[in-house]
Image (tube, rainbow, N blue to C red):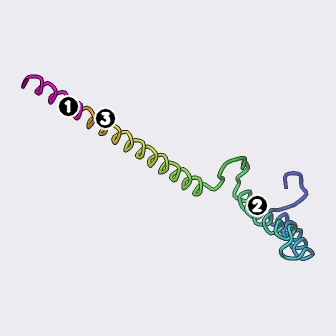
Amino acid sequence: LGEGAYGSWDALQADLRLMFRNCMTYNPAGTVYHKQAKTIQLLADKLVALNRRGVKDMRGRIADPATAQREAAAKAERKAAHMQRQASRAAAQAQKAAERQAKAAELAAAAASAGVAR
């Protein structure tokens, strides 16, 4: 489109679909060519749809704002869950340490009291 080879996104998409349809017509279902044509056609349709909406930069980014927002929310939830697990582990370790200290204090008190009773 930028170089004038196609006048519209519809023209580009029609040409791409013709190419993929020919590939799937002349290569039996189940072959790698047929499968790849189907896969690439789906990808091409998504890319054309994004470009129609004005998205230009798709390098490693989620172009759809709603999808990006869902991904960010899911990432935040995973991080919160991870932090909760870490806090739970730290609390459990602190509880065990406190129990060990209490037991050591009991033993020390018992030993001191046994020494006084002699």
> Is the C-beta separation of discs 3 and 1 under 8 Å?
no
With respect to residue 117, does 71 lie above or below?
below
- Relative image position of residue 114 (x, y in whole percent): 12, 27
What residue do we see at 22% from left, 34% from top?
102
In the rendered image, which quarter is residue 22 located in? Answer: bottom right
Res 107 label: 1
In the rendered image, which quarter is residue 39 located in? Answer: bottom right
Give the CA separation, mark 3 to mark 1. 15 Å
Q: Is residue 53 left or right of residue 16?
A: left
- Relative image position of residue 20 (x, y in whole percent): 86, 69
Judge by depth and name the residue closer to the eye, 47 or 104: 104
- As drawn, the residue found furthest toward the right would be 26
What residue do we see at 6% from left, 25% from top?
117
Give the CA separation, mark 3 to mark 2. 60 Å
Mark 2 packing: few (<14 Cα in 10 Å), some, or many (20+)? Answer: some
The three-letter code of the residue at mark 2 reads Val
- As drawn, the residue found furthest toward the left would be 117
Give the CA separation, mark 1 to mark 2. 75 Å
Give the extent of the magenta segment.
Answer: 103-118
Mark 3 packing: few (<14 Cα in 10 Å), some, or many (20+)? Answer: few
- Relative image position of residue 111 (x, y in whole percent): 16, 27
What residue do we see at 73% from left, 59% from top?
52
Reading the image, the residue beneath label 2 is: 48
Instruction: Kindly report the secondary structure that dominates the magenta region of the rendered protein.
Output: helix
Reading the image, the residue beneath label 3 is: 97
- As drawn, the residue found furthest toward the front would be 118
With respect to residue 83, does 20 lie above or below?
below
